[in-house]
Amino acid sequence: MTAYELENTNSSKIAAEFVRARTRAGSPAMGMVMTLVIVVPDEDAETAMQAAQRASREHPARVLGVILGDGRGKAQVDATVGTGGGWVGETALIRLTGEVVRYAESVVLPLLLPDSPVAIWWPTQPPDNPAEDPLGALAKRRITDSAAAKRGKSSVMLRQCQAYAPGNTDLSWTRLTPWRALLAAALDQHPTKVIRASVSAERISPSSDLLVAWLNDRLRVPVERHTSEGPGITEVVLETKQGPITISRADGRLATFSSPGRPDRPVALKRREVPALLSEELRRLDEDDIYAATAKRLVALDKES
């Protein structure tokens, strides 16, 4: 990637560098479909930008990495602006220090692509209320990842559900897509009433908390949560009058699907990496009604416990 360092800069100079970079690359026209803002600590910035780079192959975007530094002292904006090097789009990693940290949205707003959707992603510790966060308020899609939080992952997931607003989502929910598809297919094959269910997962697993809430909301039956050695979710059991329907995954890659009256069969159920999860979430910018209902149910279950 060709990168240009801008020290003690501002939004207009960063925007001008984007234009110069496109001209140097021989692509003066913008072919990007959205702006992706990444709010990330300095130590996690490289990993997050690499994930966004892989996701940009499917979603050409202007990617703005925002590092919020020490809010004390003189306000300063530094940026690394780049194109090429595997990026489908353009990127800027912006470091804010001093008083400007409190007004990060004023730096980001002029850099958003006009007439295009904005998504924001917190790869690690998210705000308690993404929709009311000054940067989150700029976006139509707000992506958090409770499983990557530095501390209190389950508490972070609960707070995200309590503060749910249209456009919010969490990669802990995205990780459930293959599980939910398999469970829905299992019930299509066995259209019988489920009496109760259980989910087994490692002790701290925001995805398993969401899966319990989803099953409880959709099936209206008690759902027990059991602790296993992991990795992640290891087993889901749906108890029916015909017998148990079980999806068991001990190694994080291959699952065994067992159902009444049929032989066991292997099913691919590999744990996905963050770039794949991010790409999935960027495919839809409308509200996820199922996630909204699941978040509401998780909050209700917490109050009942």
Image (tube, rainbow, N blue to C red):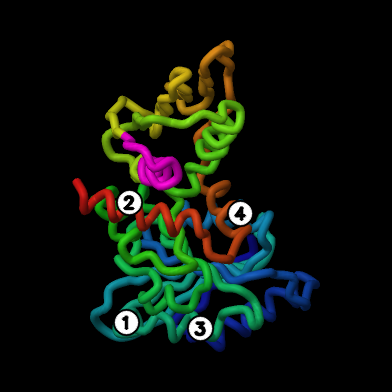
Front residue of 32 and 164: 164
- Could you say where residue 247 lies in the image, as x and y percent from the top left? 48, 25
- Badge 1 is on which residue? 102
Mark 2 touches mark 4? (CB < 8 Å) = no
Q: Judge depth for marks 2 and 4 and give the one in front.
A: 2
Q: Judge depth for marks 2 and 1 and give the one in front.
A: 2
Pick whichever of labels 3 and 2 is earlier in the sequence: 3
**In the visual, does 262 lie left or right of 40?**
right
Amino acid residing under circle 4: Ala
- Badge 3 is on which residue? 109
- Badge 4 is on which residue? 55
Determine the CA span between mark 1 and mark 4: 29 Å
- Badge 2 is on which residue? 298
Judged from the image, the secondary structure of the residue bearing numbered disc 3 is helix
- Could you say where residue 132 lies in the image, as x and y percent from the top left? 36, 76
Judged from the image, the secondary structure of the residue bearing numbered disc 2 is helix
Q: Is residue 7 above or below residue 47?
A: below
Asked if the stretch drawn in magenta spans residue 7, the answer is no
Pick whichever of labels 4 and 3 is earlier in the sequence: 4
Mark 1 touches mark 4? (CB < 8 Å) = no
Residue at point 77% right, 77% down?
A: 28
